Amino acid sequence: MKIELSAQQKKAQAEFKAFVNQEIFPYAGEWDRQELTPPELIKKIAQRGFLGAILPQEYGGQAMDMITYGILNEEMGRGCSSIRSLLTVHNMVAHALCKWGNKSQKEYWLPKLASGEIIAAFALSEPNVGSDAKSVETTAALVDDAYVLNGQKKWITYGQIADVYLVFAQCEGKPTAFLVEKHSPGFTVKPMSGILGVRASMSAELYFHNCQIPRENLVGRLGFGFAYIAASALDYGRYSVAAGCVGIAQACLEACIKYTNERKQFGVYLKEHQLIRQKITQMIANIKAARLLCYQAGYLKDINDPNSIIETAIAKYFASTVATKIANDAVQLHGGNGCSSEYPVERYLRDSKIMEIIEGSTQIQEITIAESGYQDYLFANVTTGLDKQLVERT
């Protein structure tokens, strides 16, 4: 079966690439050094409809198919992983509300999210809670007609500038999701700096000290927080990150091709050395493989195939580990220059390592994928092997 983009998807890809080349790529290094995202850039991204990429048109969204959304994230990731992470967290919250919010929440919040009138952040991680997300320590209690939150969140992407946060807390001992607006009483934000990668993503710590929010800001039901709301949002987040990792790897490849065409060693251009060509070949092959895994995951999401979840995990695992390897090779290939901020590959390496941690670490993906493999193996052997008759009888 030939996997090929449609004419519409190719057109969208060209538009995304042109936007990134003009508005993002030339400035990403400076934003990384300043550790900020310019407000005017966010306005341009919003005007293009990228913040409502996956929302239905009835709420002002673009209703992009998932392959097109993946292409958008790849191109954004090629330009700047920090800017791509804005799409990730904003659309994670938008998706969660679209799927689990009630009618009034959808009607009020989704048009604002789609237009970029408000920016959303996803608040799950805590100082003591990372991969074991269902064990969040932040608490929520219903007092009179309001929920009162106490606790702390950490590593919250674009937490410095978000207008609303999808916050996960224990309520009556059950992981539950809430919407917290930035001006809620008892809520404070502390900027984070000096992070290894995605430094322009304006990460923050969030503090809740008897923070009061309206009762109607409960999303879904008590206990829906992790198994339903967070899980579905993280699945979309993993897909965004996977595609963004393909973008990082593609940027590394392009930087290396440019550098090896210009740099001479031992009297010839670097591209003439066989070991350099070997590295370039490995980059090309791994990028194509990662891209196809993302396309496959996106296609399965579009047709609502239940296998899309595990295929997304595989795509995220492969693309993030490949991006780190390619970025590491890119720095090595650049030699001393690769360690300087004058060349973008050092940023690509820092950013790629972050991708192996966020939205489910490499190790968590390995556990998930291996468990799926064992289940598939056991099912295949039971239903097609010697035990088939026993299964049919039962």
Image (cartoon, grey):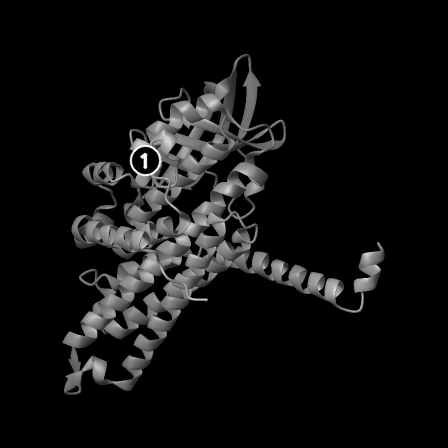
Where disc 1 sits, the SS reads loop
**Residue corresponding to mark 1:** 160
Q: Residue at x 57, y 59 (%)?
A: 369
Q: Residue at x 50, y 59 (%)?
A: 314
The quadrant where residue 368 appears: bottom right
Q: Amino acid at mark 1?
A: Gln
Q: Position of residue 96 (x, y in %)?
A: 47, 36
Name the quadrant of the C terminus: bottom right
Q: Residue at x 32, y 38 (%)?
A: 51
Q: Position of residue 219 (x, y in %)?
A: 51, 28
Q: Is residue 28 above or below residue 377?
A: above
Q: Which residue in the rendered view is the most extreme toward the top?
A: 144
Q: Position of residue 259 (x, y in %)?
A: 19, 72
The quadrant where residue 207 appears: top left
Q: Position of residue 359 (x, y in %)?
A: 46, 49
Q: Is residue 354 visible?
A: no
Q: Is 233 on the left or on the right of 72, as rendered?
A: right
Viewer-closest of 344 and 101? 101
Viewer-closest of 56 and 263? 56
Q: Is residue 175 above or below residue 284?
A: above
The count of marks equals 1
Q: Is residue 340 visible?
A: yes
Q: Is residue 364 above or below residue 160?
A: below
- Please rate how many residues cluster around mark 1, counting C-alpha atoms within 10 Å: few if below 14, some from 14 to 19, many from 20: many
Q: Residue at x 56, y 22 (%)?
A: 141
Viewer-closest of 342 and 252? 252
Viewer-closest of 178 and 57? 57
